[in-house]
Image (cartoon, coloured by chain):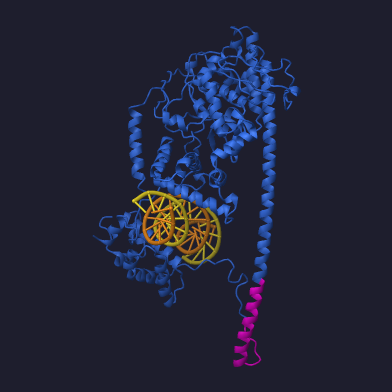
Chain colours: A blue, B orange, C yellow
Amino acid sequence: MPKILTAVDGSRSGMLRIKKKRIPQSRNASGNGYGGVALSERAFWRLWAGANAAVLLRLSVALSAVRAEEEEGEEGGGPLAALPCPALLCAALRCPARSAQPSPGKARPSHPTQARPDRSVALAGVEIEDWERREKECGVLLSVFILLLLRCACSQTPLPPLARQPQTPLFHALPAPGHASSREEDEEEEAPYHPDPLPPPQPEPLRERIPPSPAREETMSPVERLEVPPPVAPSHSMSTVLALAAQPPISPDLKVTENGNSGATGEADADAEEDKKREREHKKRSKNWTRPETLKLIRLRTDLEPRFAKSGRKTELWDEIAEALQRERITRDAQQCRDKWEKLTAGYKEVRDGVKDREDNPFYDELHPLLSGKSLKRERERDKDTFGSGKEGAGRDYSKELSRELVVDGFTRDIDKDGLYRGGARGRETFKDDDDDGDEAEARAPSRKKKRGPKYITVTDLAAVQSLLEAVISRQQRFFRDLLDSMERKEQLREQIRQEKEDKWRAEERAQRGIFNNAMIVLTQKLVGDRVSAVVPGVAGPLVVGSPEGPQGPKRRSKNWKRAEVLQLIKLRGEMDSRFVKSTRRAALWEELAELLAAQGIKRDGKQCREKWDKLMAEYKDVADGKRDQGESPYFAELTAIIGRPPEAA
DNA sequence: TAGCAAGCAATGGTTGTGTG
DNA sequence: CACACAACCATTGCTTGCTA
């Protein structure tokens, strides 16, 4: 077998280790930017914190519209019927102009099944750093309640394109979870943005109700649970709205075609083929981990930490993590997950040990809770301490519990004047309002004189609900403004410290360089002066000093390789090939080769030799693959002579 | 001045070694 | 034996600077 073919077969140390080219991937696409983010729990909290008055405004408009509609007597049926119709609410959220002057019968779809059932909401162009921390600090039931409303509303009608409201590009539609092209928080697979006006509602069959997959259930966040409520017959009552939210999510394993039919046959085949393709491609180097992928890995690894802490084999655990990622359409095997985790921990340690700045590690905050040695349990307990006892412990688990309680038991709500959840009775389709006068100043009172049992009122006064919402939202906005301000201050402080360090370092470097240059000048003057004076007494020789940058100055790029140099490199590399094949530590061999070149007056270091060789091999491979003409590789003949005969009919 | 090549940084993969 | 860790290697995309 010719050497080249052996090498092509994948010998690690072969001369020509020809691999298939991986699909180029921009580094920017690997996690640095956030194009659009599906409304995950985190994104929701961000929305909430974003001081987005637009949301409140539109919610208010929606409520007003409902009230106006009710006053017109077109929607009779008692107080429950006066709750915001999901469709109308959505319309209001979507298009203020239309909803501000509701046209009865137009703002609401004629039939709910005519609306596309599942569209998740996405936030466009928002930075969501630090949100995992902040989300833990927000365990406000009312927020979940409003989310519930929004999600229900959004499940009934398609969400608007951005172009309709360019001034507030808050929402845009994404394919629902479970859709083939949907992957939460994965900017690479973000649904394309369509600036077209809203399409007319198309008749669409109801989605099949599928019981949730237990495995999926475990990994879903509360918001995900709420994300795809299946459509049911229209109802404006809160009980129905909550029942909607209580529906189990569509299993991600079920492929739903665009027209709503189960695509178990066609898409499953396509998926199987896709999996096979992925399997084949997995032979190649995987794509870089994107930020969402990495975050999921961290989350899964953190969740399994108690089991990792136990002694015993970890392979199964990594398999579990890989499987969990697979369920989220992230194709990484256990080994890749482990490797990535090792890299992450290494990066974390670098920051911890001061080798790198915290800013250099984009996952430091995510890794810190686990790797700092604090168990998640402790942190949760701390969170509970921070926010109070019981269910007021903020964070994901709290939200999960909360939403589960909500969706399982019907609407349960008891919100105190701080907008905090205080528990409440279950199974009642009522709101509770502690003060009928709705005095906001009093509502802001930080404490209550006594704890009262839950009281309930029926929802007849939407204005009260509206004012309550406004109060809570403004409170949260203040909270988050303060939080962001304090974070900004910290950031400025860090930057200041960093700048001071850098200035100090530069000053030291300048001083050292000056000392070195002075020493060099003195030495050179002495040497040259002595020699010149010995040869031509009285004539001062040229003062030869180093470059102004000194030996530690910026390294100048070396000259391009001359043909003779390249030929010599090829020759020597060919002579050493057997040693390169045997060795796995080739740096020393490259250095040795560099020394041999140096002996012939070719000044290149080992790394330069290796890089040049890599280039030559790449060229050679292109010629071998037929991508380049043989004439484009000026060293093809020489390489062929050294490393083997060229592949026939390559 | 355009094109090309060197250099760099980042990432994933592989291998060797130490440890429990 | 499995795992953790470190070092090395391969590859890619991008920037910079040289060369024709």
Q: Residue at x 36, y 34 (%)?
A: A271
Residue A103 figure quarter: top right
User: x and y percent of residue A553 in the render?
Assistant: 59, 68
**Vertical side of A431 occupied by A578: above or below:** below
Residue A483 is one of the magenta-drawn residues? no
**Vertical side of A631 occupied by A26: above or below:** above
From the viewer's perspective, is A9 left or right of A160? Answer: left
User: x and y percent of residue A567 in the render?
Assistant: 37, 70
Residue B5 figure quarter: bottom left
User: x and y percent of residue A93 in the render?
Assistant: 60, 23
**Vertical side of A238 occupied by A392: above or below:** below
Q: Residue at x 48, y 31 (%)?
A: A220
Residue A524 is one of the magenta-drawn residues? yes
In the image, which residues are magenta?
Answer: A514-542
- The front one of A561 and A277 is A277
Q: Quadrant of the C terminus of chain A?
A: bottom left
Please name the predominant secondary structure of the magenta segment in the image.
helix
- The front one of B14 and A53 is B14
From the viewer's perspective, is A565 left or right of A156? Answer: left
Q: Quadrant of the N terminus of chain A?
A: bottom left
Observer able to see residue A160: no
User: x and y percent of residue A203 in the render?
Assistant: 45, 17
From the viewer's perspective, is A375 left or right of A437? Answer: left
